[in-house]
Amino acid sequence: MRIPHKFALVILLLSSIMLSAQTRSKLSDRMYVDAEYAPFYYGVASGDPQQTRVMIWTKAGTIQPVSLFWEVASDSLFNNIVRKGGTVCAAERDYTTQVDVDGLLPVHQYYYRFITTDGKVSQTGKAQTLPDDSVKHFKIALVSCSGVWSGYFNAYRRMGERKDIDFIVHVGDYIYDDVDPDEHVRMPDPEPKTPATLEDWRDRHMYYLLDPDLRYARQNKTWIVEWDNHDNHVNNFEKNADGLTAFYEYLPIRMPDTLHPEYIYRSFRFGTLADLHMIDMYLFRGKEQFAAGRKSILGNAQDAWFKKSLSESKTTWHLVGNQEMMGSWLSKGIPMSMHAPGNGTFFNPDAWDGYVDDRSRLYHFLDSNHINNFVALTGDQHMSFIIDLTPDPRNHKLYHKHTGKGSAGVEVLAPSLTAGNMDEEHIPRWIIPTFQRLSLNLNPHHRWVQFWKHGYTTIDVTAERCVAEFYYSDILQKTDKENFGRGFVVKNGVNHWERKSYRRPMVR
């Protein structure tokens, strides 16, 4: 039952009671609760799909537990309800709830909703199950670095609208703990503070869900998500347990290991066509050694799980959700006067470049076990990259930039959804192509870069090829348009990107 329009403003005012002092201030543009669907102000979401099950999520209530019914149907009118049950939104989970719905069919889109005991109905969400072995094709949207103060979430709206996108994969920095002083596009008053308590982290997630475009993408697509540093703030589980707790509460994730909530790494199988391994380098990098004096980036337990999953997989493609750049980004050769970030050898030694021995060990594992079609799906860098994965890209005997021979796999880095890059660093746009050319000259394994646009990347998979396409949106104003950037192809068994990209005139 929808709330009559004449009551919407009253409910909107009353709903402000639910927000913390931080978010109860003057809100930024295009930020509001979904008052027409009270008490489901923050929408619905689905995630962590399997062939026969999927997680569904909502939030209701602020003071006392709220009992709910949930329904899953094969049609949007709910004439054919296939699963139903009850759940409770209670204080222990900040009045959020997640239901692990089983007994579903593979490669099906379902509709779901939540209903209070007095008949109030949530928005209708869409949930997609993973395909079975009959699958011939699927497409995901790869996204990261979505700063709500940095700009408008136009790209989320576009992803939610696109019928050709089956799933959204978010590889970290879904929320931001801090506020970049150069990115005050949609800033509330007063300026938010860095979360310090569990309540702060919950408030930050609630604030993000005031954005209707994010709510729309969560409502209309099934998500697979992992965290990165801004989702949790510090690289120490004992200190950031509050951030992890709130992350699990506000995103539809099936906790892989209830005894170890910091173990978010997990796998998804798209029939015999592909598997997707979501790895976590953030919480484990540098904490263990795989040999004396040689630090591991994944930790020994996760490293063993990852390689076992790769070696036992029978799928054609091996997609890897990965928070930070796996391939090297070499800076050696840049004049010291330019003050390039990093250590004079790599631009970002906090990524896999800081663990060269461990990365080379992974590449050797892929080669020695004859594992082809390895595709790293990465975010964090806020810029767009297409990379061949090779241990020594400047060694012409090991890697040939004109043919791609010597590559162990490929990587695609999605741009940030909104978080700042060279444009927000106030570098004149006319000079950015010079930096792009300089980076490409220093990195022969980088096939293409784009340093100032924002948006997302689609990954289109068939048995014959995997295609990455970049889509860009304005972040400084609300818009319904997006622009196609470039497309890149890697063919089955080749292990490097095709040498030519493609363009096509396209405005969505």
Image (cartoon, rainbow, N blue to C red):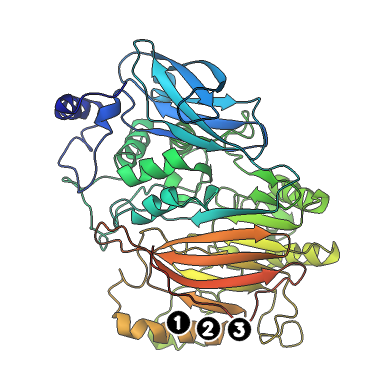
For the residues bearing labels 1 and 2, Cβ distance under 8 angstroms: yes
To which quarter of the image does residue 297 belong? Answer: bottom right
* Residue neighbourhood size for the residue with mark 1, other residues' Cα within 10 Å, grouped as few (<14), some (14–19), many (≥20): some
**Could you give the CA–CA distance between mark 1 and mark 3, rounded to whole angstroms?**
12 Å
The quadrant the N terminus occupies is: top left
Q: Is 224 displayed left or right of 400 in the figure?
A: left
Check disc 2 and report the residue beneath it. 440
Q: Amino acid at mark 2?
A: Leu
Classify mark 1: helix, strand or loop.
helix
**Could you give the CA–CA distance between mark 1 and mark 2, rounded to whole angstroms?**
6 Å
Q: Which mark is residue 169?
A: none
Residue found 15% across the figure and 30% down from its top = 9
Q: Amino acid at mark 3?
A: Pro
Residue 19 is at least partly visible in this image = no
Q: Amino acid at mark 1?
A: Gln
Classify mark 3: helix, strand or loop.
loop
Expressed as whole percent of the image width and height from the top left, the position of residue 152 reads 29, 55
* Residue neighbourhood size for the residue with mark 3, other residues' Cα within 10 Å, grouped as few (<14), some (14–19), many (≥20): many
Q: Nearer the viewer, residue 410 or 306?
A: 410
Residue found 67% across the figure and 70% down from its top = 490
421 lies above or below 177? below
Classify mark 2: helix, strand or loop.
helix
Q: Nearer the viewer, residue 301 or 58?
A: 58
The quadrant the C terminus occupies is: bottom left
Q: Nearer the viewer, residue 290 or 243?
A: 243
Expressed as whole percent of the image width and height from the top left, the position of residue 466 reads 65, 64
Residue found 63% across the figure and 35% down from its top = 256
Check disc 1 and report the residue beneath it. 436
Q: Is 351 displayed left or right of 177 in the figure?
A: right
Check disc 3 and report the residue beneath it. 444
Q: Is 8 displayed left or right of 361 in the figure?
A: left
To which quarter of the image does residue 396 belong? Answer: bottom right
